[in-house]
Image (cartoon, grey):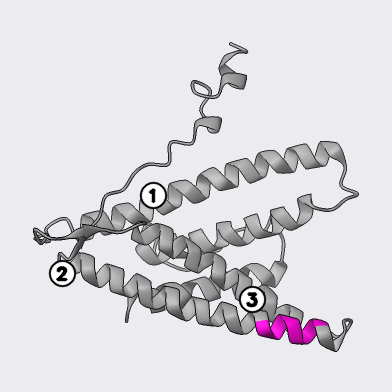
C-alpha cells in the first residue's frame, strides 16, 4: 500500500469518527497502536477536524467576546500541536531513510513529506464538508451545482497531491531527493521572542 493510500484511509476514518459527535470537546479514541505512524496520522487529522470547527465557531458574529478570547487561545494551542505533529511525522521519514545513499545530483523538495501530508489531511476535511453541502435540502439547485463543481476539483486535487506525495517518498527512498527539515520556530508562541510577552517581564 502506498503511503498516500494509507494516509487517506486513516484521514477518512478520523474525519468520520470525529463527526459521530461533531464536538470539539469529544474524547479522541485513537484505534491505532500508540506511537505508530498510523496513530500519528489519525491524531493529525483529528486535530485538523477540531481546528476546522474552532474556525467555524469563532466566526459567529454573535459570539461572546470572553468566549471568543478563550477560543482564540485554544486555536493557538491547536495550531502548535498541529505543527509539532507534522514535525514528528517528518522525524519518522528522516529516521526511516537515514541510511539511503543520496545521489550526487539529488535535489531538495520545496516542502517535506509531512507538510504535504498535512495538506492531504486538510483536503479530506474539505471533501467531507463540501460533500455535505451537495446533500443539503434547504438550499437552491444553484448552490448544489456550485458545490458539486467544487467537490470535483477537490477530489482531483486530492488525487494529484496523493500522487505527488508518493513520488516524493519514492524519490527519497531511491536517493533522487533528500530531506532537510527546518523547525517552524514560531516566534509569537515563545515568551523570549514575542516582544509583547517579554516586555511584560
State how many labels appear: 3
Numbered disc 2: secondary structure: loop
Query: Which contiguous range is marked in magenta?
Result: 143-149
Numbered disc 3: secondary structure: helix
Magenta segment, prevailing SS (helix, strand or loop): helix
Q: Position of residue 72 (x, y in %)?
A: 70, 41
Q: Is residue 125 above or below residue 2?
A: above
Q: Position of residue 151 (x, y in %)?
A: 64, 81
Q: Which residue is mark 3?
A: 128
Mark 3 neighbour density, 10 Å: few (under 14) some (14–19) many (20 or more): some
Q: Who is closer to the viewer here, 146 or 169?
A: 146
102 vs 83, left or right, is left
Residue 136 visible in the shown view: no
Instruction: Please name the residue shown 78% across and 85% down the image.
Output: 144
Q: Who is closer to the viewer here, 177 or 113?
A: 177
Residue 10 visible in the shown view: yes
Q: Earlier in the sequence, mark 2 or mark 3?
A: 3
From the image, which quarter does the N terminus lie in? Answer: bottom left
Distance Cα–Cα, label 1 vs label 2: 22 Å
From the image, which quarter does the C terminus lie in? Answer: top right
Instruction: Please name the residue shown 63% across and 67% down the image.
Output: 18
Q: Residue furthest top?
A: 201
Q: Earlier in the sequence, mark 1 or mark 2?
A: 1
For residue 87, which numbered disc appears in the image? Answer: 1
Distance Cα–Cα, label 3 vs label 1: 25 Å
Amino acid at each position: 500500500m502506498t503511503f498516500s493510500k494509507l494516509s487517506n484511509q486513516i484521514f477518512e476514518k478520523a474525519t468520520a469518527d470525529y463527526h459521530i459527535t461533531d464536538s470539539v470537546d469529544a474524547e479522541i479514541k485513537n484505534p491505532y497502536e500508540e506511537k505508530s505512524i498510523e496513530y500519528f496520522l489519525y491524531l493529525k487529522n483529528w486535530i485538523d477536524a477540531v481546528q476546522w470547527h474552532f474556525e467555524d465557531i469563532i466566526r459567529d458574529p454573535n459570539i461572546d467576546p470572553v468566549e471568543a478570547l478563550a477560543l482564540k487561545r485554544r486555536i493557538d494551542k491547536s495550531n502548535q500541536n498541529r505543527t509539532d505533529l507534522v514535525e514528528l511525522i517528518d522525524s519518522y521519514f528522516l529516521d526511516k531513510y537515514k541510511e539511503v545513499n543520496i545521489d550526487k545530483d539529488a535535489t531538495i523538495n520545496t516542502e517535506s513529506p509531512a507538510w504535504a501530508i498535512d495538506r492531504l489531511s486538510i483536503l479530506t476535511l474539505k471533501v467531507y464538508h463540501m460533500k455535505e453541502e451537495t446533500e443539503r435540502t434547504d438550499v437552491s439547485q444553484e448552490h448544489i451545482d456550485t458545490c458539486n463543481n467544487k467537490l470535483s476539483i477537490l477530489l482531483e486535487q486530492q488525487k494529484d497531491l496523493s500522487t505527488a506525495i508518493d513520488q516524493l517518498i519514492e524519490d527519497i527512498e531511491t536517493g533522487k531527493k533528500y530531506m532537510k527539515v527546518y523547525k517552524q520556530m514560531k516566534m509569537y508562541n515563545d515568551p523570549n521572542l514575542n516582544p509583547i510577552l517579554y516586555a511584560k517581564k
